[in-house]
Image: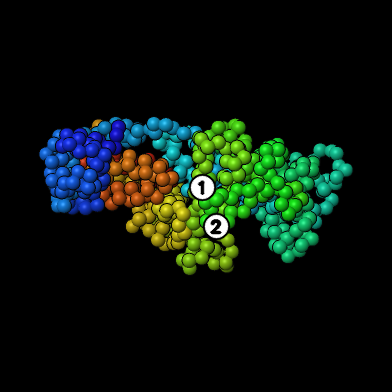
Amino acid sequence: MKELTELIQEDMKEAFIKAGYDGDFAKVTVSKRPDLCEYQVNGAMAAAKKYKKSPLEIATSVVSCLNSSLIGKADVVSPGFINLTLDSKALSLYLEKMAEDEKFGLEPVKDPKNIMMDYGGPNVAKPLHVGHLRSAVIGESIKRILEFTGNKVIGDIHLGDWGTQMGLIITELKIRKPDLPYFDPEYTGDYPKEPPFTMAELEEIYPTASAKSKKDKEYHEKALEATRQLQDGRRGYVALWKHIMHLSVNDLKKNYERLNVSFDLWKGESDSKEYIGPMVEKMKADGFAYVSNGALVCDVSQESDKKTIPPCMLLKTDGAALYDTTDLATLVWRMKDYHPDRIIYVVDKRQELHFIQVFRCARKTGIVPDSTDLTFIGFGTMNGKDGHPFKTREGGVMRLSTLLDDVESKMLEKISSNDDMSEEEACDAAKKIALAAVKYGDLQNVASKDYIFDVDQFTAFEGNTGPYILYTIVRIKSILKKYKEKFGALPAISFGPADSGAARELELSISGFQRAVRQAADELAPSRICAYIYDLSEKLNKFYHETKILAIEDVRERENAVSLVRLAMNILNKCIDMLGFSAPDKM
């Protein structure tokens, strides 16, 4: 079914045309002054310039020609605004149609796309930390929103598993355990099935090696050489790499599962290695790649550039691949295997230059056709209350698992006073509320903006927070449970004209669901969903406080009220699912 604004606009367009004016002036918007009207049409002002008439005269003639079952009242206000109020019965019928549809009236996109999403992007052999939160949370939500609107979406974690960090680990491991067969170039037997380290050891090895590399030039060169040999296929190093991957991926899956984030593909930079050689040779043959200061590069600058865009580096002076190379080769296999209409990257905004280079090189060399859209969503930094990147009290980077543990503990403490919950129910609720607090706290912000991660604010049960949204849902669940205990099964959803201001406001908020989802999908902005459900929760709580639903004596009126809160709750549940979290039964 069409959005209400679309339906109203169709009627207004007919009125404009009937009055002798261009129908394009009939654009309908939601009123920013709900105390005056619910929708507005301001086209008479623009039409006045074209038709050399006063806006008031045009608006008056349009309203006189308006014939719409949706509009209960149409007023002309100087200097030429047309204020519209919906017909109560028409609004009720619209909500009934929404309730009958599993997607609440949202029409699928007319031209569904085959979309690939690149989000997550952690380096293996390292624990997830708070810096990984935004890519995972934002990417997962965008994926769910695009799927809900009718697109086919494939999510790829794109692991960092083929760069210098691998050479660093191998170099450090060789120093610690030089007698392992992986380091013997003459060894021809089978390598051990079990890795020569635990995940905990691996997590300690990498930062140690990284710190050494920054101070010791010789050590750094050894790490670069180990990286090159790994990429060239040295047998022992590849075997070690497989051990690292097995341990790391299993650990990552547990952490992402806790975040309620999933990926269709667990590909890494290494999956592009077989495409690198042919890709580079083709770029050379086509005249795009050339040697500059010993490295192989491709120019990507354009005359319109206001600042210098450096060449895209394809191979380093030692012939090793780097991020530019693997990202380009990844595009090669993505186009070959999936033929996407669009590829979306959810990455730290500080990597924007890198993606400008990669996108331009991919277009210039024919890796990606013009028909495939390449989109970069650069997100801002998650900061502490001091305005600097979020750290532990000791000043280090906090593990993501530690952050979730802390928030879960805080939520468990808050809800522990609820005697109606078992210990198991309380723990489950604390996990769900904590996840909502963390995800909603992030997603309510415009992705490109930095934001302050304030645990106290995000875990509050009042205000624009995840727990507040969940508390609203749980409150309605409780009402519906009591209704069934008192009156039997829930009635079929039906609506009568709203008999109170709070009910009318709630109906109007519900009716905006399709518009909010469409905006979120078009703008790739989960913040649109957050803004919508906060407004819906506010209206729902206002109605709840003003209406003692279970005490309503008139059966029809009581069923209308139950239908209204039930539809609102169902929509809230669908929206939080698009954001990547769910509500408990009790709080």
For the view shown, which residue lies furthest in the front direction? Answer: 52
| Dot 1 crowding, Cα within 10 Å, few <14, some 14–19, many 20+ | some
What residue is shown with label 2? Answer: 307
Give the camera-side residue of 420 and 369.
369
Identity of the residue drawn at 86% across and 42% down: 187
Could you tell me which secondary element the residue under label 2 belongs to?
A: loop
Identity of the residue drawn at 55% across and 57% down: 307
What residue is shown with label 1? Answer: 376
| Dot 2 crowding, Cα within 10 Å, few <14, some 14–19, many 20+ | few
Residue 362: image location, x then y, percent: 59, 41
Residue 414: image location, x then y, percent: 40, 58
Could you tell me which secondary element the residue under label 1 belongs to?
A: strand
Q: Report if residue 99 is visible in the image.
A: no
Q: Amino acid at mark 1?
A: Phe
Q: Nearer the viewer, mark 1 or mark 2?
A: 2
Residue 329: image location, x then y, percent: 64, 40
Q: Report if residue 335 is visible in the image.
A: yes
Identity of the residue drawn at 41% across and 36% down: 148
